[in-house]
Image: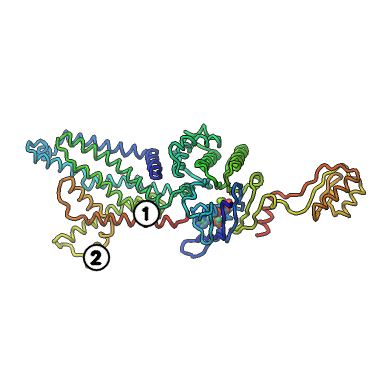
Amino acid sequence: MVLYAFIKGIFREALAKKILLTIFGFFTLIIVLLIFAITNSTVDGLQMMLESKSEGGLKEAVMMLQSGIVSGIPMFMLIASMLIITSSFVPDMLKKGHIDLILSKPISRTKIIIGHFMAGIILVFVSFLFLLGIIWLIVSLKTGYWNVNFLYSILWFTLIFAVLYSAVILIGILSRSSILTIIINLLLFFPVSWLLYLANRYFESDQKGIVFGPVAEALLKFLYQILPKAWNMQDMCDAYVTHSAITSYQPLISSLLFMAVMLSVSIWYFNKKDY
Amino acid sequence: MNVIEINGITKNYPAKKFSGDKIKALDNVSFKVGSGEIFGLLGPNGAGKTTLVKILLGITFSSAGKATIFEKPVTDVNIKRKIGYLPENHQYPNYLTGEQVIDYFGRLSGLSKSDLDKTTYKYLKIVGMDEWGTTKIKKYSKGMMQRLGLAQAMISNPDLIFLDEPTDGVDPIGRKEIRDVLLELKNQGKTIFLNSHLLSEIELICDRVAILNKGALIKEGSVEDITTTGNRYIFNTSDLADDMMNKLLMEYKSTVNGRNEFACNVNSVEDVNKIIDYLRSSGILIHGVNREKSSLESMFINLIEQKN
Ligand SMILES: Nc1ncnc2c1ncn2[C@@H]1O[C@H](COP(=O)(O)OP(=O)(O)OP(=O)(O)O)[C@@H](O)[C@H]1O
Ligand SMILES: [Mg+2]
């Protein structure tokens, strides 16, 4: 009931601020461009493979194409835009004269936070379902290979968003400013967690070109452990799409832990704060 | 039954971040509000009225003391099902229409769609806003916002309603309408807690009032008690002869205001009747006998000035 009210509220806000329109307009544009690219593909290798008569070659090519669609840069752009859009929800709720009213209603403060968290996730899930779902349909219809695993990318992207959105909620509550929330979270997403991801990959590899001091290495490893691992999760998403094996679920687990901590701190702080 | 019981509520706000200094917004405030009353909380700006209401609604937490509503601690969220609230400077997302504001907050109050379908326009009509339901609230005037806020506060048919400056920005006719709405709610047995500095208005509708100054409760009681200053009566009569005026002056220590009016301090009602007997036996017609009252406003100003 309450969740429904928050979701409806957030969708109304997104509608009113023309956010939904922008998202779906933008997404439709991406889809149209994609159709255009597939039909007039000049990328020789891909074109050749897509036209390949052998079934194996076709599957490879489709997976390569799909893996490109959900690769790092599109992932960052999609999720970053969603973080920007959702960053104003909590600061808007906390405006003087509005939060008073919400808190006077028979809803616990914990539910208010969880409600806003869930509502944001649902908004983003629906958007990704639309975008990636249609892309999947187009690619499948066009090539005749229905790679159902591509649909997992909707869940993975929503999950990556959810992890980062938990930090949006906390910083929104602490700062009450959507600008600050956007800046901090985007920096966390890129470059911070990206650099940590690269550093970790480097530490795990054998080559030791650059030498980090032991303190710096420990610090980087520590930061890598506690901060969300969006880029590892993108790798995992890619593994799902291309039917490859996932070596470790560790990054997912620690990211979910990060999310749980962010939410718990948000709830704890919100529960004791005077408004 | 007491709907609200406040016991020694104290609230300290940090004066400046990290300084450790404190602002005492409320200092050991205690009083009770009975069922079915219209209760007025008065006080100058910054007295702590809003802070007290926020504590009662669980929006702010008290530093010390205890308060209950419907005999449950104010930290219990479930009591809020039966409470309506119109905050001061209330704000709604301005892209909503009046109807959507009611829908959103009605749902947060736990109402279902069918409840809301039935009641939204009923309450918009009560506050005279039924023709504005589908207009975006960014086009509303201040008084219209206030009316919408009042409808919002009533939507869940609460037993207790907190109104913080409900007539702020409302024109005189609108104020009269709002007073009528409040009296109607009272007739239905609802309890109303009103924050205001519009003393003439409070005087018109409140049963009891409490006066806060700088966070401390300085007076509490019925409007009648607070405005009645003492045992001073004013007599209006037909023309008094000179010797009678003298006698009233000397014997009854009256202040004579002219041939037709005099005022007199008495010890009891018997004294009043003695004077009436004297006047009647002297063939004077009595037009009226009234116990003198000061207005709530002059009382209020006196009290606040004494304290400062
Ligand atoms: N969030 C806050 N942080 C710090 N001090 C506050 C806060 N809210 C209120 N105060 C202080 O508490 C005191 C009481 O404020 P409050 O808003 O309760 O007064 P009020 O009686 O409602 O005044 P008004 O008639 O102007 O509405 C004031 O001194 C105010 O500065
Ligand atoms: Mg106030």
Q: Is residue B134 left or right of residue B228?
A: left
Extreme-front residue of the structure = B1
Residue A173 x %, y %: 40, 53
Q: Is residue A136 left or right of residue B84?
A: left
| Mark 1 sits near ligand 1, with its Cβ under 8 Å away | no
| Residue B89 visible to an observer of this rendering | no
Tell me the chain of label 2. A
Q: CA distance from mark 1 to mark 2?
A: 27 Å
For disc 1, the neighbor class at 10 Å (few under 14, some 14 to 19, many from 20) is many
Q: Is residue B198 left or right of residue A234?
A: right
Residue A236 x %, y %: 20, 50
Quarter of image, ligand 1 = bottom right
Tell me the chain of label 1. A
Amino acid, disc 2: Ala
Q: Is residue A63 left or right of residue B175?
A: left
Secondary structure beneath dot 1 equals helix
Amino acid, disc 1: Leu
Residue at mark 1:
A170
**Residue displayed at 15% across by 36% down:** A41
Extreme-right residue of the structure = B243
Residue at mark 2:
A218
Specify the quadrant that holds the N terminus of chain A: top left
Secondary structure beneath dot 2 equals helix
Number of numbered callouts drawn: 2
For disc 2, the neighbor class at 10 Å (few under 14, some 14 to 19, many from 20) is few
Give above or below for A102 relative to A254: above
| Residue B256 visible to an observer of this rendering | yes
Residue B169 x %, y %: 57, 42
